[in-house]
Amino acid sequence: MTAATTPSIDLDRERASLERAWANGRGLLAWLSVTTHQAIGMRYIVTAFLFLLAGGVEALLMRLQLARPDNTLLTADKYNQIFTVHGSTMMFLFAVPMMEGMGVYLVPLMLGTRNVAFPRLNAFGYWMYVIGGLFLYWGLFTNTGPDVGWFAYTPLSGPQFSPGKRVDVWAQMITFTEISAMCVAAELAATILKMRAPGMSLNRIPLFCWGMLVQSFMVLFAMPAVMVASNIFLLTDRTIGTHFSNPAEGGDPLLYQHVFWFFGHPEVYIIFIPALGMVSAIVDTNTRRAIFGYPAMVLSLVATAFIGFGLWVHHMFATGLPQIGEAYFTAASMMIAIASGVQIFCWLATMWTGRIRWTAAMHFVAGFVFIFVLGGLTGVMLAAIPLDLQVHDTFFVVAHFHYVLIGGALFPLFGGFHHWFGKFTGRLIDERLGKLTFWVLFIGFNLTFFPMHILGLRGMTRRIYTYPSEMQWGGANALATAGALVILLGGILFLVNVFTSRRNGEMAGPNPWDSGTLEWATASPPQNFNFLLLPAVTGRYPLWTSFKERIAVTGLRNDRREVLVTTLMDAEPHHRYVLPRSSIWPFVTAVLITIGLIGSVFQFQWYYPGIALATIGFLGWFWPRAQEAEP
Amino acid sequence: MSAWGTPYQSAVNAAGPQSGRIETLFWVFTILLAIIFVIVIVVLLLTLTRRHRGIQQEPLEQTHIPSGATEHRLTRTVAAATIVTVVVLLGLLVASVGTGKAISGLGTARNGLAVEVIGNQWWWYVRYLNDDASRIVTTANEIHIPVGRPVMIRGTSHDVIHSFWVPNLNGKIDFIPSRVNAQWIEADYPGRFRGQCAEFCGIQHAHMALWVVAEPPDRFEAWMNHQLEPAAAPSDADSQQGQQVFLNHACIFCHTIAGTAALGSAGPDLTHFASRSTIAAGTLPNTKGNLAGWIADPQNIKPGNHMATVALDSADVQPLIDYLESLK
């Protein structure tokens, strides 16, 4: 395990050995058993993208219904199911899993290791996510789609006012996706803290990995809260007759709101902190200079995460809480703007002094700055209680959070797609079509969402399936619907670009953009083992240091899935660690747990066989295999 | 005012001291933040278009880090921008808290009027409170208030969470079962202001509106005195038949008409039904034609609402409508 170049290694033999050890096999069984991070990450990305398309179709249906007053395209019942599933899809089935998929794919590459820390947990998390998503859509297509909003406030969502199984489907979908999110969070946090390339001390981690680390800790603290809300307060009230939210029996409907938003607000940062990391990766590559203010950027991410847990009450200003207490949450909400501001200033400073390459990805970054800053400033308005009490639950808020989430997460994500497309597929995405996609999306987005600010100020409340023509909301709504169709066009352009570029794009090569970070130090797409020789690093941008300073790690066994574990602060080599092989058990365990989780929605007693079956799954998963440790 | 279109449900067309202060705060925030937005976008455009003079000599291609002097200059600029951000935010925080305090100070000391409003799926129960029990008025979906006098809205809910919002007069306040929340409203001039439930409350959340009618004090008193009276007795044979139809059908299980045997409380009080301007919580203008359609098939007009369809002989419909529309 000496960190020095050893010219005597037979690279061809090492490569053959690695290929054997990391091979995924053929056939359906092997496909279900995959535990390599590139495959799982790409599955997350593709699945989440399909859910983005589903959520987009739902958004379009809502826009068509609201395009003119007294429209009858959708019934009230259908509209309520669709807006609930739209919100739930975008938050739980698209945004979080998509960011996690990008993390699962990119983090081990950026850190210079071969896989995530817990590969089977990774596979298990993915299957739980897929099953939860399919469960929700099974509900929607069998007229059992939830219809109480993605927040499912009690008592509306309770057994008295929402009989039937619609809300249970929603609440159990949350269980699946939260388990999945926590699996990814645990494995990414462990990977980032303990599996970095030698020399990659904490102050040399790429900012995207810092983003994923911060996000992972947020997930670990926030997601249990929503499981308490949806699973304990809501599901047990509904299935076994507890009274957490029933005021007639001493329960409290506001308790649910507190716990839900203790998760719900950090959720926003869980989505957009990884996106900020993507922005940094695109900016440093395309300005060809080290990001300005790295420590300030990292501290801003960490500060956002901490403050993010201290402002959930700004979703509840209208519930009649004491004024002094509420003022604290105004101040906390505004503090977020300082952390975001510092990051925007640092990117602008980087761009100011760099040599900008005006790529499609940079277009998306510029669009991000425009949209995200506007959304952030309306966020400052919402932090002011008197203003919030006017525009809360109106289309002004709809405009605000689409500016923050689409501007703050989706635009960086699309920038990231254009940036890393060559790494993912081996071929570059077409730049001209990419820039056109950007302009269509940018114009469509502003056309859709800017008029909503005015609609909200003029009294249009959220979640209404129709409105009378006297309200004179028709014009701005028609404009918004036209904008939604432009966004659809942008989405089609992107898909066309993806499919044509995958076949005919220019070959990317290992490092098409002359980037500085380690994911570009290997083939595009990377092989299952990522690196033939594991890198050691001496700076923040290893590929920007001169070639003679490049160092590789030797001394690991390549005939099994072995990785190097390094120390937390300075990433000094600590010990060798053998990762498990592919296994069908994560998939089997997910299916067995599903029997209990979904069965119990309909008949509570299914929990008991569910627990027994899950135990069988875990026994198979963790059954010791001597030959695996010493092949 | 007209530029904003609908003046009767708008947060930027204040008609009272509470909403007026909020509107002022809104413009302070909007103008200041718009200036900040423009500055950021100008800087962004400059970074994208400027020719990188000055740093051209620096060996950026090799080191990927500009010279120490450049970085030092950037540090100072970013620090200054951050300090400005903090100062602006502190100013806005003070303005926001100050406005909140000013609003909560309005109305509390003077000769207020107290109105209890209870949210129901999907209509508003309204009761004017009074120490003298004989002067308590009950109505629904329409709140009359005297101009220039503060009115306290005390609210709760009978079922799920609703939110009371009349934007021309004040921000919103949630009505939560088992809790009572209150806010003050006041109108500076006579007018009709629309409000709407703002918290999603089930399938007909979209059709849960209300009207606040601000009137000069003398007209308000006259309205109040009229509302205190029991329902008008039917004046002709047709209306008498209509009253019998009402009393002999399921209507009475849910609705009250003071002075008759109808004492139901699950639906709106109909004692002075014809004096109100809308039916079904702001869904339809109160006309005989709309009322006929509503009674014949409430589920068609407001699908999922809790009003039952009562089977009526066709000969009974017109008298019933005539009777209800005589309840001025």
Image (tube, helix red, strand yellow):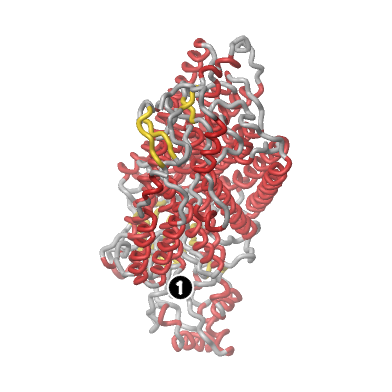
Is A199 located above or below residue B97 in the figure? above
Which quadrant holds residue A561? top left
Tell me which residue sits at (55%, 17%) in the image: A546
Q: Vertical placement of B184 versus A306: above or below?
A: below
**As rendered, which of A59 and A374 lies closer to the eye?**
A59
The reply, left or right, for residue B92 in relation to residue A478 is left
Depth check: give the residue in front, A540 or A239. Answer: A540
Q: Residues within 10 Å of mark 1 (few under 14, many from 20)?
A: many
Tell me the chain of label 1: B
> Residue A339: where, in percent of width, then height?
43, 31
Residue B302 percent location from the top left of the image? 54, 71
Residue, disc 1: B272
Q: Amino acid at mark 1?
A: His
Per the image, label 1 sits on a secondary structure element best described as: loop
Q: Residue at x 38, y 84 (%)?
A: B261
Residue lying at the far left of the rendered structure = A250
Q: Nearer the viewer, residue A210 or B149?
A: A210
Residue A499: image x %, image y %? 69, 46
Q: Position of residue B66 (x, y in %)?
A: 54, 14
